[in-house]
Image (cartoon, rainbow, N blue to C red):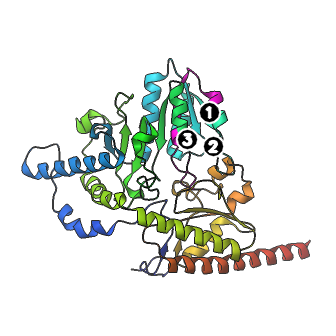
Amino acid sequence: MQNHSGTSLQERIYLDHNATTPHSPVLKQRWSELYEVSGNPSSIHQDSRITKTWLRETRQKFADYLNCSTLELIFNSGASEGNSSILKSVWNFKKDSKPEMLISSVEHPSVIKTAEYLETMGAIIHWIPVARSGQIDLAFIKSKLSEKTSLVSVMFANNETGTIFPIKEISTLAHGAGALMHSDCVQMLGKYDLQAHELRLKEFDLDYATFSAHKFYALSGTGVVYVKKNSPWVSLVHGGGQERSRRGGTENVLGIASLGLVMEEVKNSSVKVNEMFRLRNLMEAQILKEISRCTVTAAEYPRLSNTSSLVIQDIDGETLLMSLDLKGFAVSTGAACSSGNPEPSPVLLMMGLSRAEAQSSLRISLGWSTTEAQVQLFILTLKEVVEKLRSINLSAKDYENVSR
């Protein structure tokens, strides 16, 4: 199969795993088994009992991994739906007595845009600053928390820089003020080893958390929301009694089944996570050595094992991305949901990078299947492309000076 650039898809090197992950090979192995079943899990005949079993088994696997109750999990279409549902649910229940929310300034657009919508409804949003180093402003959180705060929302790890935030500490602060705590945990599974850190969802003491299947090698269009028992919840989708009447609509059975199939891999991903960490560090060290005027954003702050956000001076990030794409490498300049937006990354701007720096950014996110040979080839290609683009820019500046 050929893509638009004429490069075989088999020859391409995919380094954009924070946008979405490729499907796990286990899905291909079991696809015919999944494909042949078409029962609606809300029916009671034999075909439907099979799909209902898939839902029950997947819910149990997910609950076991996170150390929560199966009754606290809701299947939906993905984290955007989950994030929006959570913020709106809290607002609907708490708006009269607790109209304020604290939300980090570097959240995913599904959180940012929902919060901005709630502002039009009267909500007071305090945007938590995040420094260039990647450090979130805990002092700001302490100063803004009050009896009027309904919710604190801080993502587990940033999708662009990979920075991991101190969720447990923030949750303690939120609960101390009587507020609820939500975390977008989309980038957690498969990129952070919970078992190695002896953690589960309960240890973070969250009231809400969101997950998206396509971020950890399952099918897109499926998500999971964790809603702690007795936490406010209002369904955005009304209809049948699916998900204990918390989310109407026939469940995405294939997507949910795929999630269940990859959970065993996620549970045993320690070796893969450690290898991504090794390759990421190797890649950054060599890039900084080989390419001048290049920095890694939030390099000294705890980050996901697979993520590197670079600022390469005197380079336009979009031009660099397209040049690398033509060479067979899939990378990004920021969040996939902002692709095509001519404006630089809001996350990087919020962290204090200049507009020029943000426009010179490149995000590389490794995956379970990334090899050292692929990383070395990427480094070599990146160096060549950067040198070429810089020489073109320098020639253009020389011509401009002569013309003057």
| Residue named by callout 3 | 112
Q: Secondary structure at mark 3?
A: helix
Question: Of the residues tagged 3 and 1, which is closer to the observer?
Answer: 1
Question: Is 103 contained in the magenta span?
Answer: no
> In the rendered structure, are the residues bearing label 2 and label 1 in contact, judged by CB atoms less than 8 Å apart?
yes
Mark nearer the N terminus (2 vs 1): 2
Task: Name the residue rendered at 55%, 20% in the picture.
Answer: 147
The image quadrant where one finds the N terminus is bottom left
In the figure, residue 316 lies in which quadrant?
bottom right
Callout 1: few (<14), some (14-19), or many (20+) C-alpha neighbours within 10 Å? many
Which residue lies under the disc numbered 2? 136
Which amino acid type is shown beneath numbered disc 1?
Ile
Q: Is residue 310 left or right of residue 313?
A: left
* Residue placed most toward the observer, 373 or 392: 373
Ranked by sequence position, the earlier of labels 3 and 2 is: 3
Per the image, the residue denoted by label 1 is: 141
Q: In the image, residue 319 lies at what x, y percent? A: 65, 69
Which amino acid type is shown beneath numbered disc 2? Ile
Q: Which amino acid type is shown beneath numbered disc 3? A: Ile
